[in-house]
Image: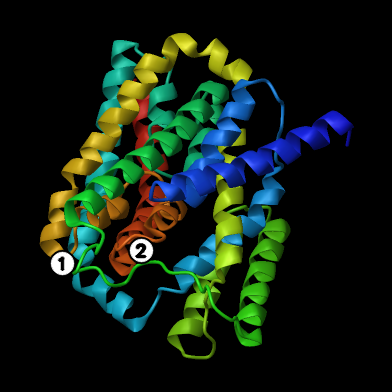
Amino acid sequence: MTYKRLLQWTLLVAGAAASIALLRSFHVPGAVMLGPMLVAIAFVLSGAGLKLKPSIFLPVQAVLGCMVASVISWDLLRLIADHWMVVLAVNILSIVAATAISVVFTRRGWLPGQSAIWGLSPGAASTMMMLGEQRGGDPQIIALMQHLRIVLVTLTAVAVAGFVSAGEGSAGSAHSPAATVFLSGPVSLNVIATLAGLVAAGVAAAMATKWGQAAFWVPVIVGSGLHVADLSTVEIPFVVGAMALGCGGCYAGLRFNKQVLLNCIHLLPAMFLGIVLLISSCLALMWPIQRSFAGADALTAFLAIMPGGIDAAVAVAHGMQASVPVIVAVQVMRLLVVTILAPQLARVVSRYC
C-alpha cells in the first residue's frame, strides 16, 4: 500500500468517525451507518479511488445477522403467525407497485432498455443486478439505481425517525419498548464466544458456497435457534455493533463509481423519480401495518416496509424507540417474498417490454 493510499484510508476512517460524532450530537437517527456512508460517497466523488472487496463485507453481514437473531423469540414467531396475512399482503403489494412503476418507465423510454425493471426492485439487489445483466440490461445503470435506492431509502428512514422523535418528544414512543439496544456494559465470555462462533460460521459458509448472503443468514438461523431454545444468548456489544454499522455504511458508499455516475448523469432525474415513487408506494403501505400491529408507530411501520433491506432497517432502528420485533417480522417475510417473487415478475415483464 502506497503512502497516498494509506493517507486516504486514514482520512476516510477519521472522517467517518467525525461524521458519527457530529450526527449523534444532533441526535440524528442511524448516525452510525449514515455518517460513514455519506463520507464514503464524498470520497468516491472526489476521485479518491478507494474500494472495499466484497469479502470485507462478510463479517459485517454476519454481525447484522446476529443483530436480527438477538430479537428472535417465541413472541416474535407468534407475532408473525398471528399477522401473516397482513405481512404477506403488504410485501406482495410493494413488489407489484415496484413492477408497475418499472413498466411505465420502460414503456415511456425514460430509462434505457430494461434497466428500470431490474433497478427498481425493492430488495434482492445483487440478484437483480445479476439477472438484469443476463437479460441484456446495462449492469452499471442497474447497479447505480440499486445503490441510489439504498441511500435514498436510508435518508428517508432517518427523516421519518427524526419527524416521529420530534413529534413524540425526547421520551420516545410509549408503545414501542423493544428498541435495538447494544450492550454498553461488561460483556461476558459466553456472549463473546457465541458472537465469534456465529460470525465465523457465517463467513465460512459464505466463502464455501460463494453465496454472500450466507454470511447473513447462517447467524440468523443458527443464532435464532440458540436464542429461542435458551441454549445461548445472542447479544451485540456496543463497539462491535457500531463498527459493523460503520463499515457497512462505508462499504455502501464506496460502491458508487464516479465514472458511471458521470456517464449516467442525464438519467439521474428519471432514476430519482422512480425511487421516490417506489418509496412513496411503501409509505402508503404503512397504514395496514399500523392497523394490524397494536401500538406500532409511524417509524416502526416505515422501517418494517422500507425497500432498503433488513440491515438498513435494523441500523436506523438502533437507538430509536421502534418496535424491532414488528420490523423484523415484516422484513424477514420481505426477504422471502422478494427472493422468490421479484425475479420471476421481472422476467415476465421483461418479455413484454
Task: Indicate the quadrant where residue 126 lies.
Answer: top right
Label for residue 295?
A: 1
Left or right relative to 171: residue 206: right
* Local secondary structure at mark 1: loop
Q: Is residue 341 above or below residue 254?
A: below
* Local secondary structure at mark 2: helix
Left or right relative to 10: residue 104: left
Circle 1: is it few (<14), some (14-19), or many (20+) Cα within 10 Å?
A: some
Please state which of residues 158 and 227 is positioned toward the viewer in this rendering. 158
Query: Three-letter amino acid code at disc 2?
Result: Val
Please state which of residues 329 and 103 is positioned toward the viewer in this rendering. 329
Q: What count of labels does the image hold? A: 2
Find the residue positioned furthest to the left.
Answer: 291
Circle 2: is it few (<14), some (14-19), or many (20+) Cα within 10 Å?
A: many
Q: Is residue 304 above or below residue 96?
A: below
| Residue for badge 2 | 328
Label for residue 347?
A: none
Q: Is residue 48 above or below residue 131?
A: above
Residue at 23% over, 66% down: 84
Left or right relative to 179: residue 94: left
Image x and y of residue 313, in percent: 39, 53
Query: Three-letter amino acid code at disc 1?
Result: Gly
